[in-house]
Amino acid sequence: MTRKGFGPTGVDVPNVGLGTWQMENDDETSAVRALRRGLDLGMTHVDTAELYGSGRAEELVRQAIAGRRDEVFLVSKVLPTNASRRGTLKACEASLKRLGTDRLDCYLLHWSGSHPLADTIAAFEELVQQGKIQSFGVSNFDVPELEQALALAGPGRIACNQVLYHLGERSIEHEVVPFCEKHGIAVVGYTPFGRGAFPPASGRAELNALAEKKGVTPHALALAFLTRRPGLFAIPKSSDARHVEENAGALSLSLSSVEIAAIDRAFPVGKRRRGVAML
């Protein structure tokens, strides 16, 4: 299994974890079963947020990790509208209650909002001092926003930046990924299979052929590519235990430079963009 240092936290985390966005819309029994199967297979990085189903996803995670909390690298996120200093503290308490735990391994600002970032980071630091979170980070931040966060928090304090990243949306590789690598910030890719058909039409034949030759699923191959660099992680969401098992195939899948180059040609990085892509 591939485990890598998660930014400056000193914690080794599997390259592929478990996302929960929109899981509240799925069958509860299936969702919890899928999360537990992921944990069984070593996908112990579990990501959620107060936004997801207004906390319902956190409640599903609570069921899945019951009796197994110490196995899990648990991440949740505060909404920008709640991210004042006092609001962040209150939101964290509510998330902890829904998750049935006394701590988060990492707590993120979901995206940049109207509350001063300095206040949010001050609240994060207070939560660290209280032992309620072990580390903190951001989500959907572009390079100027990351620069601001680093200036406020100081070096070695921003654990990760969680961003949209899939074969059809690789624009973070132009600036965001190099910046994060330079400053030791983990990059966590959400929605790693995109929102449309997978594999994407352009490049589908090449990916399928390579997966067949390698004896793996296209899903596992894509995840291995998206986590090919030391600071890259992915959090695919699935409420189907069989799909989770497919995704887990990427945990120990290594790609040769030839294979990486083939996927790179099939799904080009594309043009630079202003800011970061969001769903």
Image: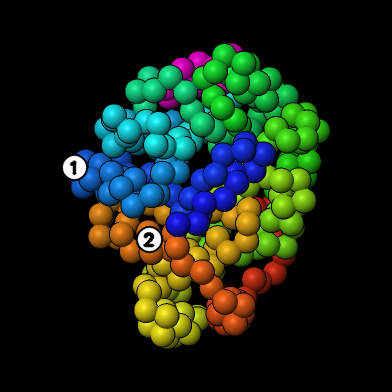
- What segment carries the magenta color? 86-96
Residue 173's quadrant in the figure? Answer: bottom right
Residue 212's quadrant in the figure? Answer: bottom left
Between marks 1 and 2, how big is the CA–CA gap? 20 Å
Q: Callout 1 environment at 10 Å: few (<14), some (14 to 19), or many (20+)? A: few
Q: At x 65% / y 21%, what residue is drawn?
A: 125
In this rendering, the label closer to the viewer, 1 or 2: 2
Residue 9: x and y in percent read 62, 36
Residue 176: x and y in percent read 70, 54
Horizontal placement of 137 versus 116: left or right? left
Q: At x 66% / y 58%, what residue is drawn?
A: 172
- Proximity of marks 1 and 2: CB atoms separated by less than 8 Å: no
Residue 82 versus residue 47 in the image, above or below? above
Q: Which amino acid does label 1 sit on?
A: Thr
Instruction: Provide the residue designation for mark 1.
Output: 29
Horizontal placement of 38 versus 213: left or right? left
Q: Earlier in the sequence, mark 1 or mark 2?
A: 1
Residue 46 versus residue 222 in the image, above or below? above
Mark linked to residue 247: 2
Horizontal placement of 7 versus 150: left or right? left
Where, quadrant-wise, is the N terminus in this rendering? Answer: bottom left
